[in-house]
Amino acid sequence: MTVLHPQDSLRLLPNAGDWDMLDSFPVRQVGGAGHGLPHRLVDAVVVLSHDDGTLDSEPLTLWIAEPNPLNQAQESLLGRDVLASFVTTFDRLETLTFDRP
């Protein structure tokens, strides 16, 4: 699952009215990072930009964590729902790349 934590969600939804809009979406509790806090399930498309300017898009269900003092420091996570579509190469000294197989 791909999770949008407050570090990012508050940049995308900066106003209280933006969060009111999410009231119509289902709420679930999740395990792992953000355990026990409410998350809104929203159909979305994640667009990834490559260094050469090309774009890849992945439709998915995005889990948006409701802001809470317990999750303010947590980073958003690309889940297997996105990563499974790419060959992931990690060079710990240089880069992390995602390429379509």
Image (cartoon, rainbow, N blue to C red):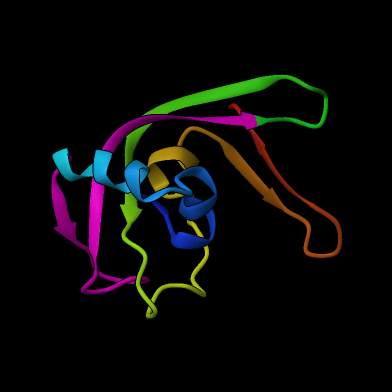
Q: Residue at x 85, y 64 (%)?
A: 93
Q: Eyeballing the image, is 69 above or below 63?
A: below
Question: Per the image, is 32 magenta?
Answer: yes
Question: Per the image, is 46 magenta?
Answer: yes
Q: Residue at x 26, y 38 (%)?
A: 21
Exactly how many numbered labels are in the figure?
0
Quarter of the image holding residue 58?
A: top left
**Residue furthest top in the image:** 54
Q: Residue at x 83, y 24 (%)?
A: 52
Q: Eyeballing the image, is 46 above or below 32?
A: above
Over which residues does the magenta segment extend? 25-48
Q: Eyeballing the image, is 89 above or below 92?
A: above
- Which percent across, then down, holds residue 19? 32, 47
**Residue furthest bottom in the image:** 70
- Which percent across, then down, holds residue 16? 36, 51
- Which percent across, then down, holds residue 24? 15, 38
Residue 1 seen by the camera = no
11 or 32: nearer the viewer: 11
- Which percent across, then down, holds residue 57? 52, 23
77 or 71: nearer the viewer: 71
**56 on left or right of 22:** right
The C terminus, quarter of image: top right
Q: Residue at x 65, y 21 (%)?
A: 55
80 or 58: nearer the viewer: 58
Residue 11 seen by the camera = yes
